[in-house]
């Protein structure tokens, strides 16, 4: 572990998955960290998320691999069906051959369990201070560090500021000031107990049913005692980016023409959370002096690649490695971090948009989609995933060294 070059802490705006991952990466570089969280308590909302091998590489690099592994459910395959006629579009084994290829498993987990693993790791270091009910409203910096003001006029001083404050980032607003791209796609998420989940869908798989202007996802959580249910549709309304409680009547109105096997998913949850989704155009500059962006603040994306949390953790690990490579010289490290991450995360944002189109294809496009992966071997699937799942600590700075 390197010795930190400054007696003052690093400030991290945001106590979500990205912020806590950043805190752990910074502590491993010898820094003390102050996390500023606007919510009344440090926590996560959401349901299940998917974890590629790259996520487990990040967990290990952050020192919480065992915690996360103990809370994950390991799937046997990923599978896609046509939601109209049940045709199996593609099936990718995530068995031992998959693990050997990528060095880690594919898994699913409750978002809160990822957050808890990171939070426990951060608390156990004794080097992370948390301030809740603290919303960043203004940022100033000089050659030696950064000063942040919260909504009550309190000030915090740090040697740098990591803006990990999510999709509606105040840090990004001050330095970039761009607008969100609201997609019009609405996501309903819920968790259903195993006894209430259909027997004929209790697969140990990350499963997706793709339909015209909609799709449905399900997979097991928490040892198979619960199932995550996610449904997405193109809204008839003018949407604004945000989260609220969902309406059973609304979600049921969008899935006409879907086969009964898939449609039963939308009748299960007693309560739903409703996300109106958005992303932003990828940007080439995240770093401004001693301030940089991380996670959704840097590259908010739609959910179709199932990589939002994974990318935030990759960011954190890469930031730590860049500091290590430059002996905690902040300007040099932040420049390297940005160069290492911009193209990869932009690819996720753009690929996610394209994947949304593929999932929601109709008419002749649907027929093309259903023909895309016909007869493809597991090895060919793995080759296509190499760019995504082949990421690890040893190669995380490669892009910076090639630009």
Image: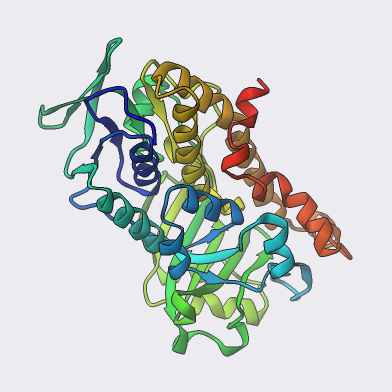
Left or right, 97 with reference to 64:
right
Which colour assignment does the render follow? rainbow
Left or right, 293 with reference to 357:
left
Left or right, 142 with reference to 114:
left
Residue occupying the far right of the picture: 375
- The residue drawn where x is 26% and y is 35% is 32
The one nearer the camera, 94 or 184, is 94
The one nearer the camera, 83 or 146, is 146
Judge whether residue 167 can be spotted in this image: yes
Q: How many marks?
A: 0
Q: Residue 115 falls in which quadrant of the image? A: bottom left
Judge whether residue 80 can be spotted in this image: no
Q: Residue 120 falls in which quadrant of the image? A: bottom left
Q: Position of residue 278 (x, y in %)?
A: 49, 43
Q: Position of residue 172 (x, y in %)?
A: 39, 27
Q: Position of residue 65 (x, y in %)?
A: 46, 58
Quarter containing the N terminus = top left
The one nearer the camera, 172 or 62, is 62
The one nearer the camera, 218 or 180, is 218
- The residue drawn where x is 68% and y is 55% is 102
């Amino acid at each position: 572990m390197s010795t930190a070059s400054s007696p003052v802490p690093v400030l991290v705006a945001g106590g979500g998955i990205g912020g806590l991952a950043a805190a752990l990466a910074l502590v491993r570089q010898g820094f003390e960290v102050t996390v500023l969280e606007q919510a009344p308590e440090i926590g996560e909302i959401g349901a299940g998320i998917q974890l590629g091998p790259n996520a487990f590489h990040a967990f290990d690099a952050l020192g919480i691999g065992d915690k996360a592994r103990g809370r994950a459910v390991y799937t046997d395959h990923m599978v896609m069906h046509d939601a109209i006629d049940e045709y199996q579009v593609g099936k990718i084994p995530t068995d031992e051959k998959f693990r050997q290829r990528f060095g880690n498993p594919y898994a699913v987990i409750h978002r809160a369990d990822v957050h808890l693993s990171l939070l426990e790791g951060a608390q156990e270091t004794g080097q992370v201070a948390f301030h809740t009910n603290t919303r960043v409203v203004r940022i100033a910096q000089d050659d030696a560090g950064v000063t942040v003001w919260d909504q009550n006029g309190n000030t915090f001083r740090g040697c740098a500021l990591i803006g990990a404050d999510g999709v509606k980032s105040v840090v990004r607003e001050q330095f970039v000031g761009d607008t969100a791209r609201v997609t019009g796609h609405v996501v309903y998420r819920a968790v259903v107990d195993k006894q209430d989940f259909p027997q004929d869908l209790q697969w140990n798989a990350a499963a997706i049913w793709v339909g015209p202007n909609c799709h449905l996802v399900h997979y097991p959580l928490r040892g198979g005692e619960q199932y995550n249910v996610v449904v997405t549709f193109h809204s008839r309304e003018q949407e604004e980016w945000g989260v609220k409680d969902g309406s059973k009547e609304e979600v049921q109105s969008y899935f006409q023409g879907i086969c009964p096997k898939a449609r039963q998913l939308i009748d299960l949850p007693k309560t739903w959370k409703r996300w109106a989704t958005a992303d932003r155009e990828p940007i080439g500059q995240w770093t401004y002096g001693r301030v940089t962006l991380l996670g959704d603040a840097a590259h908010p994306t739609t959910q179709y690649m199932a990589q939002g949390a994974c990318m935030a953790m990759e960011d954190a690990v890469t930031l730590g490695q860049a500091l290590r490579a430059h002996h905690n010289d902040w300007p040099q490290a932040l420049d390297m971090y940005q160069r290492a991450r911009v193209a990869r995360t932009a690819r996720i944002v753009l690929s996610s948009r394209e994947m949304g189109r593929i999932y929601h294809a109709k008419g002749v496009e649907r027929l093309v989609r259903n023909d895309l992966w016909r007869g493809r071997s597991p090895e060919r699937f793995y080759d296509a995933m190499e760019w995504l799942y082949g990421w690890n600590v040893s190669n995380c700075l490669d892009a910076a060294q090639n630009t």
